[in-house]
Amino acid sequence: MRLRRSAHIVYKTQYNVVFSRKYRTKIRTKGVSAYLKVVLQEIWKFRSEVELIEVGVDRDHMHLHAVIPPKYAVGEVVRDVKANTVRRLKAKFGFLERVYRGTESIWSSGFFVSMVGVDEQTIRNYVRWQDDEDLGQAELEL
């Protein structure tokens, strides 16, 4: 378990995000899938704190396993991903414009999100360890 640190924050906020294509349209070509993965890697450069762990592109939806810091709303990150991937995919693959009949997006408006967590025993151990750490720091010699 790798913990991440930011100013005054220690976190491990991993999310599984799934969003589907508009109208559940099934599009699966190796070129689209490969290009989508490249575009996703480029998007994370603008949010360097967000870490993309795994990408799964299916015929009518996409899975993202990512670490998103607590300072970002998950919906905000998903919105950015959808907007940037649509723009790049439509520019690269002209047939998508015909498939989606002039609509702005190729993604449906909603998404599914769940946290990838740690088990209860890990949390208990952390709380006990933190208590020991706090007690050790509080000892002062006078």
Image (tube, rainbow, N blue to C red):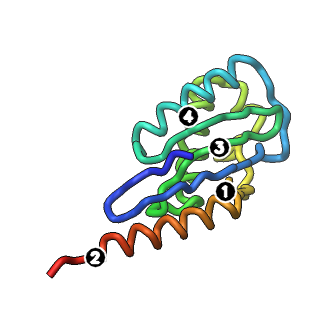
Left/right of residue 57 with respect to residue 81 in the rendered view: right
Q: Which mark, residue 139?
A: 2
- 2 and 4 marks in contact (CB < 8 Å): no
Looking at the rendered structure, the secondary structure element under dot 2 is loop
Residue type (three-letter) at the residue carrying disc 1: Gly
Residue hosting label 4: 40
Label 4 to label 1: alpha-carbon separation = 23 Å
The mark nearer the N terminus, 2 or 4, is 4
Q: Is residue 51 left or right of residue 112?
A: left
Question: Residue drawn at (44%, 50%), measured in percent from left and top?
Answer: 4
Amino acid type, mark 4: Leu
Using the numbered discs, state the Cα–Cα distance from disc 3 to disc 2 in whole angstroms: 42 Å
Residue at position x 47%, y 39% in the image: 44
Give the residue type at disc 2. Answer: Glu
Look at the numbered discs 4 and 3 and tell me whether their residues touch, using CB distance below 8 Å.
no
Q: Which residue is mark 1?
A: 117
Q: Is 55 left, or right, of 77 in this rendering?
A: right
Q: From mark 2 to mark 4, how far is it between C-alphas? A: 49 Å
Q: Earlier in the sequence, mark 4 or mark 3?
A: 4
* Labels 4, 3: front one: 3
